[in-house]
Image (spheres, rainbow, N blue to C red):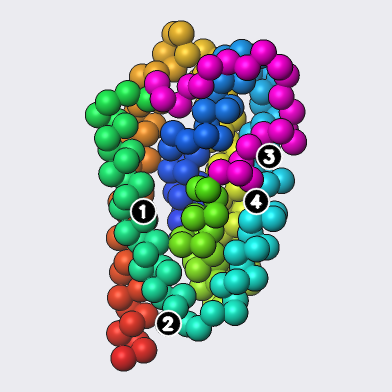
């Protein structure tokens, strides 16, 4: 059970600090409106992912085991791709996370809408989290619950931290954000190794 909690938390942390449109949204809102008004946006994944998770799991539960393993294999290389992107960002700059500030006050519902139009959650659940959740659930439903709980608790906390950092960006935000991206690159590589190893072991058992 602990291993699934660690996996969920590690992937959530890596996903939260990766530059993307949702991260750009919360950063720009924190800069424009302050952390207090922006903080509810940290809860947006809980709203947007309901649709995404139901859609992806409905598809994954209907496909053969071999195809599911193929998806996990693709997911392993997808994680390595994300790690490479994080490493390039670490070597360069994290300024791309910050979009031009918006003058209008945004709500958590608007943040959820931004996230639901973001392709990253669909890829994450189709290639990484979805297959992992099905694996955990087969072992024990409690394992699946722990995985999902650890993932969303971590992503909410990490997003809240990003909002605070963005509000304080003038003092130390960019340096800390760069360090977080570097840590996420290492986490993604470790996750990819686990994913590819799990697929290899499953294929050996099938053979």
Dot 3 or dot 1, earlier in sequence: 1
Which residue is drawn at the image coordinates 31% and 32% (left, top)?
A: 89
Residue on which the image places disc 2: 66
Dot 3 or dot 2, earlier in sequence: 2
Residue 37, by quadrant, is top right
Residue 206 seen in render: yes
Q: Secondary structure at mark 4?
A: helix
Residue 145 seen in render: no
Where does the magenta region start and end? Answer: 95-118
Label 4: few (<14), some (14–19) or many (≥20) C-alpha neighbours in 10 Å: some
Give the distance between the C-alpha atoms of the residues marked 3 and 1, in whole angstroms.
Answer: 25 Å
Residue 115 included in the magenta stretch of the image: yes
Give the percent coordinates (x, y) of residue 106: 71, 24
Please name whichever residue, 87 or 140, is drawn nearer the observer in this view of the structure: 87
Residue on which the image places disc 4: 49
Choose mark 3 or mark 2, whichever is in front.
Answer: 3
Give the distance between the C-alpha atoms of the residues marked 3 and 2, in whole angstroms.
Answer: 34 Å
Give the distance between the C-alpha atoms of the residues marked 1 and 2, in whole angstroms.
Answer: 20 Å
Label 2: few (<14), some (14–19) or many (≥20) C-alpha neighbours in 10 Å: few
């Amino acid at each position: 059970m602990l291993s699934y909690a660690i996996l969920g938390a590690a992937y959530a942390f890596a996903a939260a600090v990766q530059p993307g449109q949702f991260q750009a949204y919360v950063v720009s809102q924190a800069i424009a409106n302050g952390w207090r008004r922006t903080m509810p946006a940290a809860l947006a994944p809980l709203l947007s992912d309901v649709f995404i998770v139901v859609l992806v799991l409905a598809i994954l539960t209907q496909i053969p085991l071999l195809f599911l393993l193929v998806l996990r294999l693709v997911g392993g290389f997808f994680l390595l791709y994300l790690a490479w992107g994080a490493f390039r960002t670490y070597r360069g700059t994290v300024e791309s996370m910050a979009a031009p500030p918006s003058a209008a006050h945004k709500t958590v519902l608007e943040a959820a809408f931004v996230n639901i139009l973001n392709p990253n959650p669909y890829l994450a659940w189709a290639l990484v989290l979805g297959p992992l959740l099905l694996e955990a659930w087969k072992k024990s439903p409690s394992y699946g619950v722990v995985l999902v709980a650890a993932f969303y608790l971590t992503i909410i906390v990490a997003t809240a931290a990003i909002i605070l950092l963005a509000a304080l960006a003038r003092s130390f935000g960019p340096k800390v954000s760069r360090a977080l991206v570097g840590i996420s690159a290492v986490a993604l590589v470790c996750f990819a190794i686990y994913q590819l190893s799990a697929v290899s072991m499953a294929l050996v058992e099938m053979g």
